[in-house]
Image (cartoon, rainbow, N blue to C red):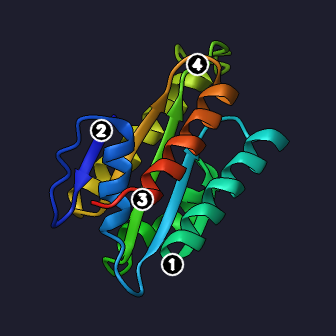
Amino acid sequence: MTYLSGSESITAQNATQALAELFAQLRPHDYNAITAYIARNPTHVELLQELRLKIRDARRVATTVGFGPRFLHSTGQLHKGGPDSCVVLQITADDPDDPMIPGMQVGFRTLLAAQALGDWMSLDKRRRRGVRVHLKGAVEPALRALVAAIADALAARV
């Protein structure tokens, strides 16, 4: 797990603690952006909406969910170029399928990973607050585990 600190440092020993420290940084008028660089399918949409609602209800802030790289041309511009009110949870994952891009020596999975990293580096350059979570193995069970970790993090006192 990679952490952005913005103006406050995250010094976590585990994922739940890192998430708790991230959500503790939410201030009045902030919003939480969940940027997911994973396959968009009905199950992932449902799990991310569950995540979004848990964060919204627990911290009483606006929340958004976007699938990368699609959101980069719309709300992604606000995350990086707008006021410092965005607290980002970036989610990436391993994907065993990496079909080659026609005419190129790189696959779509590799391109997606590069886009996620570039987005993260841009957020870091602007000192945005955030945590980057990389899901290993099968995405759906790992995403379910993240939902549980976030529920624990939201209940924790930092």
Give the CA separation, mark 1 to mark 2.
23 Å
Q: Position of residue 146 (x, y in %)?
A: 54, 39
Residue matched to label 1:
61
Q: Position of residue 94 (x, y in %)?
A: 55, 21
Amino acid at dot 2? Thr
Image quadrant occupied by the C terminus: bottom left
Please report the residue visible at 53 percent of the width from the left and 70 percent of the height from the top. Answer: 58
Q: For mark 2, give the secondary structure.
A: strand
Q: Residue 88 bears which disc, if any?
A: 3
- Type of amino acid under label 3: Val
Of 158 and 65, nearer the camera is 158
Of marks 2 and 3, which one's residue comes earlier in the chain?
2
Question: Tag 2 or tag 1, which sits nearer the N-term?
Answer: 2
Q: Secondary structure at mark 1?
A: loop
Badge 4 vs badge 1, beta-carbon distance below 8 Å: no
Disc 4 or 1, which lies upstream in sequence? 1
In the image, what residue type sits under mark 1? Val
First in sequence, mark 4 or 3: give its number: 3
Q: Residue at x 66, y 26 (%)?
A: 141
Q: Residues within 10 Å of mark 3 (few under 14, many from 20)?
A: many
